[in-house]
């Protein structure tokens, strides 16, 4: 496929561009930031005209795309003022999804966020592991935007039944160089309590994108995308008893198994994390 990746210069985006290209797809990176050269187009995604033009054709870079991976965003709350986060992310997502559907693109992968699950869990989750089954619980302007982006995707698919849009609720993206800090988390479980001690290796995030592009049927669906384990050396039973006493535990959470359920992604996308910070720490 010829695939447009928005935000391809970002932390997850760089890995997605690399892995999609390695899988044999032709990839164009649409971003505000990046280095001039083949595959990169500088685009302000809040400008609808630029979005339409960049998805239609750009010089000798491409003449239309078969799929869109929308990663570009202000990536977390607290980076810029709340209203800026909301205005930027909502405008960019509407422009990308609307332009893609108008141009006849039928495969879209959208970066949602673990935050819609209720992060930072100052109100405890309804149960653990958390999954996609309970209603969104946005607790920040950033998360509210992600929830509304998912709602936008649902309605676009209702209007266009042949369209496939997959929202991936990515956990906190990590690269191998980030893993050196992980052992320090054990000293204070509160430090990473906010997302149930979850993370996602960027390479596994890219794997989820590829799986969604290649396997998702027409329609809309959403998936939590996380690593298979937590960031902690301490066992889950100890962490939950200390930080979330009384929260119901559904099934076996293992010793270090992720508390952000990836069962649905495994079952429907064939997603299977290949990378763990524990392997990196052991020199693997």
Image: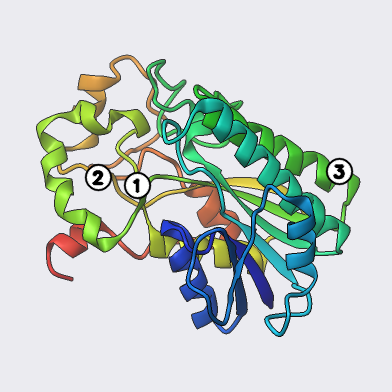
CA separation in Å, label 2 and label 3? 38 Å
> Residue at left 18%, top 37%?
235
The residue that label 3 is drawn on is 158
The residue that label 1 is drawn on is 199
Q: Dot 1: few (<14), some (14–19), or many (≥20) neighbours within 10 Å?
A: many
Circle nearer the N terminus (2, 3) = 3
Q: Dot 3: few (<14), some (14–19), or many (≥20) neighbours within 10 Å?
A: few
> Residue at left 11%, top 42%?
184
Circle nearer the N terminus (1, 3) = 3
Label 2 with label 1: CB-CB less than 8 Å: yes
- The label shown at residue 231 is 2
> Residue at left 13%, top 37%?
186
> Residue at left 70%, top 58%?
108
- Which corner quadrant of the image does residue 26 belong to? bottom right
Dot 3: what SS?
helix
Can I make out residue 133 in this image? no
């Amino acid at each position: 496929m010829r695939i447009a990746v928005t935000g391809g210069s970002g932390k997850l985006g760089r890995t997605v561009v690399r892995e999609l290209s390695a899988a044999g797809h032709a990839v164009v990176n649409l971003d505000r930031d990046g280095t001039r050269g083949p595959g990169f187009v500088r685009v302000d995604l809040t400008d609808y005209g630029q979005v339409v033009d960049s998805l239609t054709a750009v010089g000798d870079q491409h003449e239309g795309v078969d799929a869109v991976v929308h990663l570009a965003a202000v990536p977390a709350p607290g980076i810029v003022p709340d209203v800026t986060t909301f205005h930027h992310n909502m405008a960019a997502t509407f422009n990308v999804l609307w332009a893609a559907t108008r141009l006849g693109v039928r495969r879209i992968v959208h970066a949602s966020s673990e935050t819609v699950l209720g992060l930072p869990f100052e109100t405890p989750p309804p149960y653990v592991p958390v999954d996609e089954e309970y209603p969104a619980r946005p607790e920040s302007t950033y998360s509210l935007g992600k929830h509304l982006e998912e709602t936008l995707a649902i309605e676009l698919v209702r209007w266009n039944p042949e369209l496939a849009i997959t929202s991936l609720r990515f956990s906190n993206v990590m690269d191998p160089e980030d893993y050196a800090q992980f052992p320090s988390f054990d000293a204070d479980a509160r430090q990473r309590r906010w997302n149930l001690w979850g993370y996602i290796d960027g390479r596994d995030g890219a794997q989820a994108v590829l799986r969604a592009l290649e396997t998702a049927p027409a329609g809309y669906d959403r998936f939590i995308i996380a690593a298979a384990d937590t960031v902690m050396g301490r066992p889950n039973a100890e962490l939950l008893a200390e930080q979330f006493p009384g929260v119901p535990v559904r099934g076996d959470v293992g010793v270090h198994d992720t508390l952000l359920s990836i069962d649905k992604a495994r079952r429907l996308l064939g997603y299977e994390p290949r990378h763990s910070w524990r392997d990196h720490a052991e020199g693997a």
